[in-house]
Image (cartoon, grey):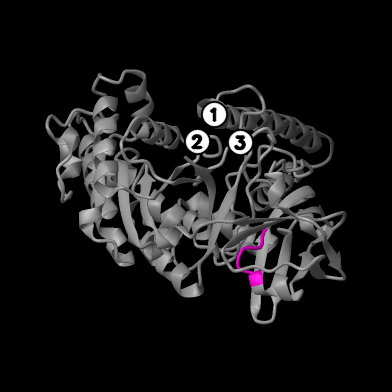
């Protein structure tokens, strides 16, 4: 997704957050003035009661970071040859005329206009999919009134047989439908290299894929050592806390993939420093030290690697060393599929630079993968996506620039695979600290007043967002 406002991809999320906070401060100031006026004109206690009720309403229904209107249409431009003609609802059954014959390798996407009911302004609206014993639910924004895209991957047999039921819950389906089918070679039958900017990115985006692949490599670019307040609470100073956090996450990046059967010899931690990749890219031959760990040598975080890399020679945190490390790994692994962040959908600076580093490393290299699969663990416009509950499906994310052709590639995870993924995330130290008190209160209010549920596997929001029936990528051929 390209920026809509002219703001660069790196800074757009920060600009949206800044605007959101400014608008929130203005709204709070106006509300305070109204409350004071009510207290003067009516009763002194009335502002206190209204303030509490207003805060409860905000936490329950208005605290999501949603930087667009729920009435905005998502704007995808899929390749015309992939569109399937004749898709329509007859009652609540999806029919295609002429009928399709699917072999199970397809990614299926259905575009449909959705309009929220009044109840869907207070509870998350969703589209329910069912056929026999198969069921799914894909949720959307409260108050939705626009074009949205369902992920029908996994419902191949039902679509072939004309038994796929599609029903709105707290929303209605109004208007014409469009269906696309994307047939891909199965990445799980190939050699795969997953590029993770931080420990846990590979698991969040692609645990199911790399667990099933013929051969998998996990390459983690940074130690993720900053924001170590959890360890400072144990009595460590800032630098020591950052170092131990980085060492733990380096260990996680090597050890956790063993849960999926990936040997430690194919898991590599490059040990560069968190949120410093943009500075490294700007001055490729200049070392860029850690922000918090008082370190300018990457080798502390490489100690668990089973193989030597070019950057081990001096441990310098430079862009040139990063590119040399990636080239050595690509030649060693010779992956047919490279999985990495999608830089125009995922706004995290380290994710954007990770993609740039891999593409630079591939330039002129004697080995080239056949396919790149992009993923997004963060979004510009919606911090809650994928919306809905854990163990449900993943609808397509908000995209508002149809100038970019995107080709989705999705795989389905069964319940056992989803549980294994949840356990892998539970092993990640960065996802283990308890949620702050304010967030726990907000979740309780949303559970009671808005009907939301959070998984028992962990308090971190990624347990809800990442443990799903689908893993979704964006395919690009080289």
Mark toward the start of the polypeptide (2 vs 1) = 1
Q: Which mark is residue 459?
A: none
> Any mark on residue 9, and which?
1
How many C-alpha atoms fall within 10 Å of the one at disc 1: few (<14), some, or many (≥20)?
many
| Left or right of 380, for residue 287 | left
Secondary-structure class at tag 1: helix
Above or below 408: residue 416? below
Q: Which of these two is toward me, 410 or 214?
A: 214
Residue beneath disc 2: 343
Q: What element carries label 2?
A: loop
462, above or below 390, in the image: above
Residue 223 appears anywhere in the view: no
Q: In this view, does 16 lie to the left or right of 127?
A: left
Residue 214 vs 346, above or below: the answer is below
Q: Name the residue under label 3.
A: 1
For the residues bearing labels 2 and 1, Cβ distance under 8 angstroms? yes
* Between marks 2 and 1 in the image, the one whose residue lies nearer the viewer: 2
Residue range (magenta):
151-156
Residue 158 location (% of width, % of height): 69, 74
The numbered mark, 2 or 3, whose residue comes first in the sequence reads: 3
């Amino acid at each position: 997704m390209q920026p809509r406002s002219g703001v660069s991809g790196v800074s757009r999320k920060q600009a949206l957050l800044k605007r959101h906070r400014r608008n929130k401060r203005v709204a709070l100031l106006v509300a305070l003035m109204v409350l004071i006026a009510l207290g003067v004109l009516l009763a002194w206690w009335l502002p206190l009661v209204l303030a509490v009720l207003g805060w409860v309403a905000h936490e329950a229904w208005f605290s999501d970071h949603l930087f667009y209107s729920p009435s905005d249409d998502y704007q995808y431009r899929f390749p015309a040859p992939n569109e399937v003609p004749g898709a329509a609802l007859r009652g609540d059954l999806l029919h295609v005329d002429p009928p399709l014959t699917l072999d199970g390798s397809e990614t299926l996407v259905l575009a449909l206009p959705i309009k929220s009911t009044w109840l869907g302004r207070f509870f998350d609206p969703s589209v329910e999919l069912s056929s026999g014993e198969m069921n799914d639910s894909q949720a959307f924004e409260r108050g939705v009134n626009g074009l949205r895209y369902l992920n029908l991957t996994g419902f191949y047999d039902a679509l072939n047989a004309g038994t796929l039921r599609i029903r709105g819950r707290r929303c209605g389906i109004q208007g014409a439908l469009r269906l696309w089918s994307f047939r891909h070679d199965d990445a799980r039958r190939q050699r795969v290299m997953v590029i993770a900017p931080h420990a846990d990115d590979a698991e969040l985006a692609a645990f199911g894929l790399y667990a099933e692949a013929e051969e998998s490599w996990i390459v983690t670019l940074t130690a993720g050592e900053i924001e170590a307040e959890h360890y400072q609470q144990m009595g460590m100073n800032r630098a020591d806390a950052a170092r131990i956090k980085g060492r733990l996450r380096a260990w996680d990046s090597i050890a956790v993939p063993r849960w999926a059967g990936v040997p430690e010899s194919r898991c590599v931690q490059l040990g560069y420093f968190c949120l410093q990749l943009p500075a490294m890219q700007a001055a490729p031959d200049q070392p860029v030290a850690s922000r918090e760990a008082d370190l300018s040598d990457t080798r502390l975080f490489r100690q668990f690697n089973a193989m030597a890399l070019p950057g081990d020679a001096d441990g310098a945190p430079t862009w040139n060393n990063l590119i040399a490390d990636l080239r050595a790994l690509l030649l060693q692994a010779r992956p047919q599929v490279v999985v990495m962040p999608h830089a125009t959908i995922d706004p995290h600076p380290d994710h954007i630079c990770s993609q740039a580093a891999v593409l630079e490393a591939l330039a002129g290299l004697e080995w080239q993968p056949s396919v790149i699969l992009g993923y997004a663990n963060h979004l510009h416009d919606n911090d809650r996506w994928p919306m809905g509950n854990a163990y449900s499906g993943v609808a397509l994310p908000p995209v508002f620039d149809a100038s970019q052709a995107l080709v989705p590639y999705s795989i389905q995870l069964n319940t056992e695979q989803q549980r294994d993924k949840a356990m892998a995330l539970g092993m990640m130290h960065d996802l283990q600290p308890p949620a702050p008190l304010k967030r726990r209160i907000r979740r309780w209010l949303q559970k009671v007043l808005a009907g939301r549920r959070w998984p028992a596997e962990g308090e971190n929001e990624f347990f809800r967002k990442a443990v799903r029936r689908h893993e979704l990528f964006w395919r690009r051929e080289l």
